[in-house]
Image (cartoon, rainbow, N blue to C red):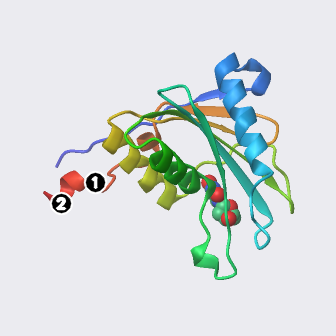
Amino acid sequence: MQQHQIQVSYDEYPDTSSLNHQDAALLEAAREAIQLAYAPYSKFQVGAAARLSNGIILKGSNQENASFPAGICAERVLLSICSSLYPGIAVIDMAISYFNQLGTSNRPISPCGICRQSLSEYETVVNHSIRLILGGSQGKVFIIEKATDLLPFAFTSADMK
Ligand code: THU
């Protein structure tokens, strides 16, 4: 028997003001995107912003539906926008923020399981990792070097060969 370990490391910053200018600007873009969320059911508005390798910044937000499972998270809305407008272009960084109308918004959230799977596929397709910048409407910011760090043992197209 052999035991293996997988470690995930992330950087923690006390707030946006301690980030470099580029990261702070992307997190600000994610915060702007919160305003465009359609979240009448959960009242939990999520915004995401991507910086592409060509320098373009794109934004997305969660879009809910009366048929709850039809709702889409901000991260997957954003990835669809990225791949529709700039297919094959790498997403270098993605910032994610939120506003919880029913509670507090002062700590980072991280992508849900389905979004982790979608982020993983995007990394594979464009052959570049996606660096995540996670922060609430205020408070601490976490930076994770690659989205797949959040999805060990990801199922990928390689598994279907
Ligand atoms: N949501 C996101 O958009 N991204 C996340 O990382 C977590 C959850 C959305 C889905 C749903 O519209 C609402 O937040 C509450 O789960």
Question: On the rendered image, what quadrant is the C terminus found in?
Answer: bottom left
The residue nearer to you, when weighing 114 against 29, is 29
Q: Which residue is mark 1?
A: 156
**Can residue 32 be seen by looking at this rendering?**
yes
Q: Is residue 24 left or right of residue 35?
A: left
Instruction: Name the residue: 50% across, 32% down.
Output: 9
Going 37% across and 33% down the picture, which residue do you hit? Answer: 128
Farthest left residue in view: 161
Is residue 154 placed above or below 8 in the rendered structure?
below
Which three-letter amino acid code belongs to the residue tagged 2? Met
**Residue 160 shows which numbered tag?**
2
- Describe residue 76's horizontal placement relative to residue 24 as left or right: left
Secondary element at tag 2: helix
Q: Position of residue 63 (x, y in %)?
A: 67, 64
Residue ID at (78%, 42%): 32
Q: Is residue 35 left or right of residue 117?
A: right
Judge by depth and name the residue closer to the eye, 122 or 88: 88
State the residue lying farthest toward the front: 85
Residue drawn at the location 34% of the way across and 52% of the way down: 154
Question: Picture coordinates of residue 43 (x, y %)?
Answer: 80, 65
Task: Using the image as rendered, state which of residue 77 and residue 120 is in the foreground.
Answer: 77
The amino acid sitting under disc 1 is Thr
Q: Residue furthest bottom?
A: 67
User: Residue 51, located in which quarter of the rendered image?
Assistant: top right
80, above or below 53, in the image: below
Q: Quadrant of residue 17?
A: top right
Report the Cα–Cα distance between label 2 and label 1: 7 Å
